[in-house]
Amino acid sequence: MDPLDTTSVEAFDMSSFLAASDGGDLDSDTLDLCKQMADFIHQTGVLVVRDPRVSTADNDSFLEMMSRYYCQPTEVRRDELAQQAHASRSSELVNPSRLNLTHDAAHAPVRPAPRCNGEQVLMEDARPEVFYQVGVTPENTETALLAHDRALQQQVSTMPPEHRPLQPSVPDPKWRFFWRMGERPDESETEFADLNAPPVVPASFEGEWAATMDGWGSLLLRACTTVAEMLAIGQHTVLPPLAPGLSSTVSPPLAVDPLPLA
């Protein structure tokens, strides 16, 4: 199959399906839409949808907050802290003993001052002790399995060139943030405490982080659920009932890249 031109991928509008799922029957056009979506994702592995329940404002609010988060410094140098202390005479500054000061300041991201939230350090939100299952994951931390698994590399080498996945040779250069959605079990009720670590709320965003992340994540999960229903119909699959509380209590973590797609 020829490579997909991603600049011309059509968005499938789910409005008619959502209107029918509120109590009406699916007409032939909506059934055909489900079939088109199922065929397209089968052929390309890509699916772009338009969900009328999601507004541009929802997307903008999430992206704007994440932009402010990632424009904070990765680390703060001792001399910068000293200058802040001298200027403000405040006792509520960041504690230098809590910071990782080994990073070369020349590689810290540039902060657009009018948009950033305070002087919080990104690395304070990292939780390597639970394998970054919550909070921020720094750049060059994650490595794709294909980069070092020789058995997998051998398997890929037997595939036709046009179907081979990209084989990375370096760690992932982007930052990521994992935010858990839904209720988590108490540590005394689970054998997998590391997989149910408490969520990380950045100190400078306490008043907006949880609501924005849960709000945008819920919209994404709801859209994905509708897509799954439409694909099942398009493939003539009988839909099993969802387990009680599935959408709110067994939700996967929301992985947030610095510049997520709209």
Image: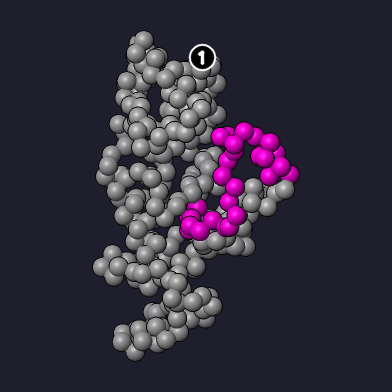
The residue sitting at 53% across, 17% down in the picture is 237
Q: Position of residue 44 (x, y in %)?
A: 48, 30
Q: Position of residue 232 (x, y in %)?
A: 50, 21
Mark 1 is on which residue type? Answer: His
| One can see residue 205 in this view | no
The residue sitting at 44% across, 17% down in the picture is 35
The residue sitting at 40% across, 34% down in the picture is 5
Q: Position of residue 109 (x, y in %)?
A: 40, 68
Above-or-below relation of 188 to 219: below
> In terms of secondary structure, where does tag 1 sit?
loop
On screen, residue 187 versus residue 80, left or right, reads: right
- Residue 262 appears in which quarter of the rendering? top left
Residue 253 magenta-highlighted: no
On screen, residue 137 versus residue 189, left or right, reads: left
For disc 1, the marked residue is: 236
Q: Which residue is at the far top? A: 28
Query: Quick one: 102 or 226, which is closer to the camera?
Result: 102
Label 1 crowding class (10 Å Cα cut-off): few <14, some 14-19, many 20+?
A: few
Q: Position of residue 163 (x, y in %)?
A: 58, 34
The residue sitting at 47% across, 18% down in the picture is 234
Above-or-below relation of 197 to 24: below
| One can see residue 154 in this view | yes
Q: Which residue is at the far bottom? A: 86
Per the rendered image, the range of residues in magenta is 151-179
